[in-house]
Image: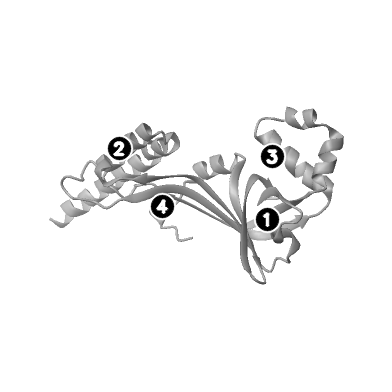
Amino acid sequence: MYVPQHFRLPDEHLGSVLGQARVANLVTVHADGPRATLVPVHHELRDGRHVFTTHLVRNNPQVLEPITGPGMVIIDVADAYVAPEWYATNDELPNVPTWDYVTVHATGRVVVDEDPAAALRAAEELTRRMGEPQVMEQVGAQRLERMARAIVAVELHADRIEAKAKMSQNRHPDDVASVADAFEREGHDYLASYLRDVSLPYARARLALIEETRAARA
């Protein structure tokens, strides 16, 4: 993924993203090409390495066919369409539509553990992180053990994480503020908050630097 410096997701926001159990695309490479499955994942640090854990159905081709190279976990945190008329400066300089988004790509070795106990641990941890640990107790140990035999635990041990927030921070500050208001009206609260907390200060600092540079050249 290409990540220009001004579109890099700040470390504190990356930590917040990784700290939550989320849905992601698990991508693996096989002899006949790449395969992907949308799965819930949770993240943890082990000896300083980022590890993403999930589980797959045992008869999924991603499990049955040998994995021939590094895999990838793609977490699309949030995204939304940006209409040109949302830009405050659009009357002065007409714009084209675009899409704002926050996404994280983690790349590394994929480890498949076919032990039902490992699959059950993965499922239990995901359930706990989603805030519903009581569900496992309600289902019961015997039924969980039977269900665990139908799935396998999968981990991605990341050696590279790329995090991108293409969030209008290269726009005029008035545009950032007006898009934030539009996102809020549309119900995109995470994106609206990000624009106000991160993109707007960046856009203001960027504009100030541009104006200082122009003044120095005048």
Q: Which residue is mark 2?
A: 177
CA separation, marks 3 and 2?
A: 36 Å
Q: Nearer the viewer, residue 10 or 68?
A: 68
Residue 61: give x, y in percent of width and height.
70, 61
Q: Position of residue 41 (x, y in %)?
A: 64, 46
Mark 4 = which residue? Answer: 7
In the displayed structure, 30 sits above or below 213; it is below
Q: Nearer the viewer, mark 4 or mark 3?
A: 3
Q: Which mark is residue 218?
A: none
User: In the shown orientation, is residue 8 left or right of residue 106?
Assistant: left
Q: Which amino acid lies under the numbered mark 2 shown in the image of this protein? A: Ala
Residue ID for mark 1: 157
The amino acid sitting under disc 1 is His
Residue lying at the far left of the rendered structure: 218
Q: Nearer the viewer, mark 2 or mark 4?
A: 2
Q: Quadrant of residue 214?
A: bottom left
User: Mark 3 is on which residue type?
Assistant: Leu
CA gap, disc 2 and disc 1: 39 Å
Q: Nearer the viewer, residue 58 or 170?
A: 58
Which comes sooner in the sequence, label 4 or label 1? 4
> Of the residues under marks 3 and 2, which one precedes in the sequence?
3
**Marks 4 and 3, the one that precedes in the sequence:** 4
Determine which residue is flagged by label 3: 126
Question: Neighbour class for label 2 at 10 Å: few (<14), some, many (≥20)?
Answer: many
Q: CA distance from mark 1 to mark 3?
A: 17 Å
Closer to the N terminus: mark 2 or mark 4? Answer: 4
Q: Residue at x 34, y 44 (%)?
A: 202
Residue at the image point whose x is 39% and y is 47% from the top = 100
Q: CA distance from mark 4 to mark 3?
A: 30 Å
Judged from the image, the secondary structure of the residue bearing numbered disc 3 is helix
Q: Position of residue 94 (x, y in %)?
A: 20, 50
